[in-house]
Image: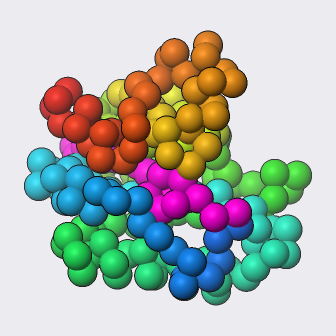
């Protein structure tokens, strides 16, 4: 069975832009690309798991989201040779019924079956409560909170919740921590 790292998109891999839908506004958080490459070199599969409620709210289209994803993937592949196995996304608003909207673990469970992943040897990285809970609900080895995006605010606002997580500065810090455990 394989190991994986599941990553939130907005605020984790790229700078948080409220309802990001324009590829021209995409800004990858510095250090993310080389760090993700190190994970790949260590044998981890990479996945993006993202809630995109702006689609369900009518703020932008699914095509807009795919355009942002395509730019993110292309930039990370071009600069550092990073490859994601799959991008899972939940387009529903929080008020709508959803198959995989985080904190649901369903996308992680789907990846485990489709890609033969051992979730107990895998990790979830994100900047929100839903990211941490998604990982825990799926049974990953650890959920990691990054202080980028909304993570620093969450660390201050919910110390009991974040005490259960590993807290790092950014995605590169998450990679450092993961590789220390491996």
Position of residue 62 relative to residue 39, above or below, is below
- Quadrant including the C terminus: top left
Q: Residue furthest left?
A: 41
Q: Quadrant of residue 120?
A: top left
Scheme of colours in the image: rainbow
Is 176 placed above or below 98 here?
above
Q: Which residues are magenta?
A: 1-18
The image shows residue 131 at horizontal and vertical percentages of 56, 41
User: Is 113 included in the stretch rendered in magenta?
Assistant: no
Residue beneath the point at 33% across and 39% down:
174
Query: Looking at this view, is 156 or 64 the one in front?
Result: 156
Q: Quadrant of residue 33?
A: bottom left
Residue 167 visible, this angle: yes
Q: Quadrant of the N terminus?
A: top left
Seen in the image, is 151 located left or right of residue 33? Answer: right
In the image shown, does 12 or 45 lie closer to the viewer?
12
Q: Main secondary structure of the magenta part?
A: loop
User: Which residue does the image show at 41% across and 49% down from the upper left?
Assistant: 6
The residue shown at (55%, 83%) is 23
Residue 86 horizontal side relative to residue 64, left or right: left
Picture layout, residue 44 above or below residue 91 = above
């Amino acid at each position: 069975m394989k190991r994986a790292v599941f990553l939130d998109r907005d605020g984790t891999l790229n700078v948080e832009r409220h309802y990001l839908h324009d590829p021209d506004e995409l800004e990858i958080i510095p250090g993310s690309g080389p760090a993700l490459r190190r994970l790949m070199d260590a044998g981890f599969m990479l996945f993006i798991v993202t809630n995109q409620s702006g689609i369900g709210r009518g703020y932008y289209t699914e095509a807009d989201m795919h355009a942002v994803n395509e730019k993110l993937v292309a930039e990370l592949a071009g600069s550092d040779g990073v490859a994601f196995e799959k991008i899972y996304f939940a387009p529903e608003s929080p008020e709508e019924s959803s198959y995989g909207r985080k904190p649901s673990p369903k996308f992680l469970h789907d990846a485990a079956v489709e890609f033969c992943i051992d979730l107990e040897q895998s990790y979830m990285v994100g900047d929100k409560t839903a990211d941490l809970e998604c990982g825990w609900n799926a049974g990953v080895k650890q959920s990691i909170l990054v202080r980028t995006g909304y993570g620093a605010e969450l660390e201050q606002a919910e110390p009991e919740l974040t005490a259960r997580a590993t807290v790092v500065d950014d995605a590169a810090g998450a990679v450092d921590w993961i590789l220390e455990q491996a």
